[in-house]
Amino acid sequence: MGETAEKKLILVVDDEPRMTRFIRMNLELEGYRVSEAVDGLTALEKVRDELPDLVVLDVMMPKMDGFETLEHIREISTVPVIMLTVKAEEEDKIRGLELGADDYVTKPFSPRELSSRIKALLRRVKMPTPVGKTTIKVDDYLTIDFQRREVIVGGKPVKLRPTEYRLLYHLVNNAGWVMPHETLLSKVWGYEYRDEAHYLRLYITYLRQKIEPDPANPKYILTERGIGYRFVNFKQEQPGEG
């Protein structure tokens, strides 16, 4: 809907004026406001000063490349970031996602592809906090506080990124049931992502590193080969109010 786009400010970071013009023109046609940066340092200033709703960040830039810029952005902000990469190489994509990118688009791309990724990402970001029982004690080692987006692991609080939080929410709410890959991808990332299995693998790995006593031998998030993932069944006390 135009109204969602209207209010949103997108920061486009690319050192190629032609590319920036192309992206700006198409995003403005969709009703977004657009800000530009030609290098990583300017991008960081604009993230700090303008508080954009989303950043489109090119990987190949002189001086400070997109990966380095992303690392610095993540030190100061959780703004959603889409990386632009010329290589369709898995390592580049995974490196970006590991550094905290939310998505990537491979050049050359159509305006429609970029627009649908932006819409899907903004939709994910504004998903409301799920209602229902907000604190779940799985066992003495693991407690999940969905309100705070936090897990208590061995007595210590661990922060979840928004995507990790959504993934864990869907797994825990279906504890004991196998969640197929496509279902998790659709629920967590959006229908457009149902074939992007590498996102799911990567974020399952992140979650296991945060919540499992031994991530190599998980006891909470179990893999059902070729089908999907299952959160271990656990006894939930019936929720009291609040």
Image (cartoon, rainbow, N blue to C red):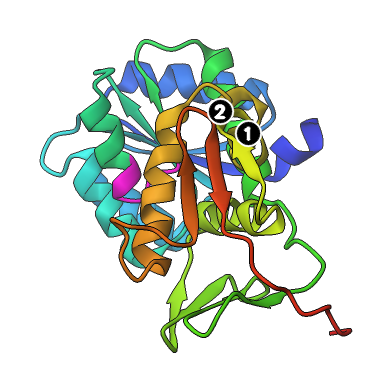
Q: Quadrant of residue 233?
A: bottom right
Q: Quadrant of residue 241?
A: bottom right
Q: Which residue is mark 2?
A: 117
Q: Which residue sits at x=65%, y=33%?
A: 183
Q: Rate crowding at label 1 as few (under 14), some (14 to 19) or many (20 or more) other CA atoms within 10 Å.
A: some
Task: Find residue 113 and report its horizontal and vertical position in percent.
Answer: 54, 17
Query: Does dot 1 land on a helix, a strand or a loop?
Result: helix
CB atoms of marks 1 and 2 within 8 Å: yes
Task: Find residue 186 and report its horizontal and vertical position in percent.
Answer: 65, 33
Q: Which residue is mark 1?
A: 120
Query: In this picture, which residue range is highlighted in magenta?
Result: 97-102
Q: Which residue sits at x=18%, y=39%?
A: 65
Specify the quadrant that holds the C terminus.
bottom right
User: How far is mark 1 from mark 2, CA to CA?
Assistant: 5 Å
Task: Find residue 3 and report its horizontal and vertical position in percent.
Answer: 80, 38
- Queried whether the magenta region covers residue 98, the answer comes back as yes
Q: Which residue sits at x=24%, y=18%?
A: 87
